[in-house]
Image (cartoon, rainbow, N blue to C red):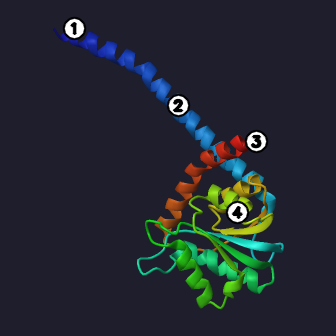
Amino acid sequence: MKGRMAEEHSGTRRRLRPIARAGLVVAGGLVLVTAGANIAMWTLSSDHRSDVAAAPSAPVVIVPGARVATDGTPMAYLRGRLDVAIDLVEAGKAEEILLSGDAGGSSGDEIASMLRYLLDHGIDPAIVRSDRAGLSTRETCERAKSMFGVDRAIIVSQYQHLPRAVALCRAAGIETDGVVAYCECRQVTEIRNNVREWLAAPKAAAEMLLRR
């Protein structure tokens, strides 16, 4: 009996080995694809990212939406983007602001929150336009081109997201430079957003390839 059980156990191990090897191959492939996509995003945007001081001038600064607080105010990520957009306008490096986000987002109306913040900080409403259906970075870029006629722009976002944002906007036909936004964030938030961006790169790379 023991001998038969040992033989069955050994047979099970032999059957599982090819499955385990296949799993390792698949996992390794996914890691390589993800790493390659992230390298591509950073490479494609490498000459088009800066801070406010080094940023070139452009007619429009695009501000992608992000979560808002329960009281309707911008949370840290979004607030950092808006503050940098304000700095760009005040420095004479952008003439207009295009807000792009989800007006029906799970955390609230991103567009209303952003617009209110800009007006509270002295921005003239006449220079602000809004895209209430910019539901993703790709859609933000494509709609800026197709619906708002944007050919040249600065896009503002945090360092994790900026390479992907610049690459996608340039792929959409917009001559785009990115400016890094700050974030007064908790470390856990930084880690979460780094992971999110790492995993989002392959989808962005695929979308860019499909456009060609």
User: Mark 3 = which residue?
Assistant: 212
Gap in angstroms between the C-alphas marked 3 and 4: 20 Å
Label 4–label 1 contact, CB within 8 A: no
Q: Of marks 2 and 4, which one's residue comes earlier in the chain?
A: 2
Label 3–label 1 contact, CB within 8 A: no
Q: Amino acid at mark 2?
A: Val
Estimate the x, y position of residue 139 in percent, counting from the top left. 63, 57
Gap in angstroms between the C-alphas marked 1 and 2: 34 Å
Q: Of marks 3 and 1, which one's residue comes earlier in the chain?
A: 1
Task: Say which of 179 and 111 sits in front.
Answer: 111
User: Mark 2 = which residue?
Assistant: 26
Q: Which mark is residue 147?
A: 4
Label 2–label 4 contact, CB within 8 A: no
Q: Which mark is residue 4?
A: 1
Count of all numbered marks drawn on residues in the image: 4
Dot 4, crowdedness within 10 Å: few (<14), some or many (≥20)?
few
Residue that appears at 44% across and 26% down: 20
Q: From the image, which quarter does the N terminus lie in?
A: top left
Q: Amino acid at mark 4?
A: Met
| Camera-nearest label, 3 or 1 | 3
Gap in angstroms between the C-alphas marked 3 and 1: 60 Å
Task: Say which of 169 and 126 sits in front.
Answer: 126
Task: Say which of 104 and 209 sits in front.
Answer: 104
- Secondary-structure class at tag 1: helix
- Secondary-structure class at tag 4: loop
Q: Amino acid at mark 1?
A: Arg
Q: Amino acid at mark 3?
A: Arg
Residue that appears at 35% across and 18% down: 13
Estimate the x, y position of residue 121 in percent, counting from the top left. 62, 89
Task: Say which of 205 and 190 sits in front.
Answer: 205
Q: From the image, which quarter does the C terminus lie in?
A: top right
Q: Of marks 2 and 3, which one's residue comes earlier in the chain?
A: 2
